[in-house]
Every structure is written in structure tokens, then in C-alpha cells.
Amino acid sequence: MLRNAVCWMMLALFPVSLFAADTNAAMLYAKGTTWVNGGTVTDSTAVFPGDLVQTKSNSMANINASGSNVMVLSDSLVTFNGSGVSIDHGSVSVKTSRGLRTTADDLTVAPVSTSSTEFDVSNADGKVKIMALKGDVSISDDSGTTTLSQGQQTTRDASITKKKRHNGGAAPAAGGGILDSPIVVAAGAAAIAGMIVWVALQSPNPASPSVP
């Protein structure tokens, strides 16, 4: 009886732990040719913190996270990091009520309030352009933080940061091996748990060492 109770507890609790571990995941919907970590996505897929998203000149991708939506525009390379995105090059359009941040080189753009905020950020040719479409956003870098009011736009020079990146070597086109995927880790853990349960149920030995 004790053995069976432990088995049922494992089966009931294990999926809950998996769900809790994946709370930073999001869904990506592709329109046109899009890559995630170098693999082609033609329709939709889950993305996790650290995943690299790349679009071609004739494609776009929509990252739908809890309380936030990020449109990755054409010819862009961004990294999804759970609480925001980082732009290597290209443009994103952000709608968020969860304070989702966007970084581009040494700049961080974030909503000033927790209310629904919309803003665009582009990173190209050593220039970062920010436009506050709905609500105010803060812009932070090494020199401090300023506020960009709704309806305003600004352009910042990011050439210094780009020079540091180029001196350190070019970023890879895709990153993250299959063994790093949370899906693969979860599947492996589920297989191990299932094997433990199966062995426990099949064992001819009683739970107690005493023999009646």
C-alpha cells in the first residue's frame, strides 16, 4: 500500500513541477521563413529564455508571452530572455502590461508604469531608435536613465557598444544545443520518473522486509 501511494504521488506531482519550471516560456508564430536557434519554423513553436529568433527580409515573427506581445519585424535577430528581448539587429514592436524590457546594445527600454504600454525599438547601423506609442518608457544606459513620453521618439548612438562587440568577435548565427532545451530535459526527467514507477509496481518484493 505504501509503495502504491508513493507511485501515485509521483505521478500527480511531477507534471506540476514541470509546469512551474516553464513559466517563462512563450509561443512564437511565424509569418514567412523564421529560424529559432538555427532551425526553420514555418508555423508556430514554443520559445524559452535564451532562444535566438531570426527573420528574413520577407518574414515576421510574433512572440506571445504572458501579458506581452513582441512583433519581430523583417530582417531581425533577437534573443528571447523570458522577461524581455535583446535586439542584435533589426526592429521589434512591443505591447506589454507586464513591464517587458527590450535591450539594444547598451540601452534598456522599459515601461515606466505597469499599465498597458506600446513602443518600437530598432537597432541598425550603429543607431538605436525608440518610439513611445502608448504610455511612457524609460531609457537606461551607463550614463543614467531618462524618460521618453508617449508620442515622442529618439535616436541614440550605439557605435561604442558595437565596436566592443566586434572586437570581441561576431555573434554566432544560432546558439543552444538540443540537450539545453527545457523540453528535452523535461522529457528525460519524465522518462526516469516513469521508469521508477514501473519498477516499483513490478517488483515482487513487499514494501515491508517482514514475511507473513
Image: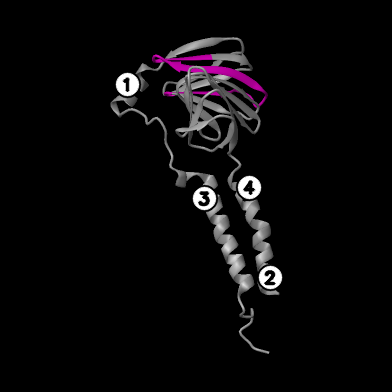
Report the residue marked by disc 2. 4
Q: Which mark is residue 100?
A: none
- In magenta, the rendered stretch is 105-130
- x 51%, y 27%: residue: 34
Reply yes or no: does residue 112 show up in magenta. yes
Q: Work out which residue is located at the far left of the displayed protein and give it.
A: 167
Q: What's the amino acid at mark 4?
A: Phe
Report the residue marked by disc 3. 185
Precedes in sequence: disc 3 or disc 1: 1
Precedes in sequence: disc 4 or disc 2: 2
Crowding near the residue tagged with mark 4, few <14, some 14–19, many ≥20 C-alpha atoms within 10 Å: few
Q: What's the amino acid at mark 2?
A: Asn
- x 58%, y 18%: residue: 119
Q: Taking 168 as reference, is 93 above or below it?
A: above
Q: What's the amino acid at mark 1?
A: Lys
Q: Which mark is residue 19?
A: 4
Asked if labels 4 and 1 touch by Cβ distance under 8 angstroms, the answer is no
- In this rendering, which labeled residue sits more in front, label 3 or label 1? 3
Mark-to-mark CA distance, 4 and 2 = 24 Å
Report the residue marked by disc 1. 163
Crowding near the residue tagged with mark 1, few <14, some 14–19, many ≥20 C-alpha atoms within 10 Å: few
- In this rendering, which labeled residue sits more in front, label 1 or label 2? 2
Q: What's the amino acid at mark 3?
A: Val
Precedes in sequence: disc 3 or disc 2: 2
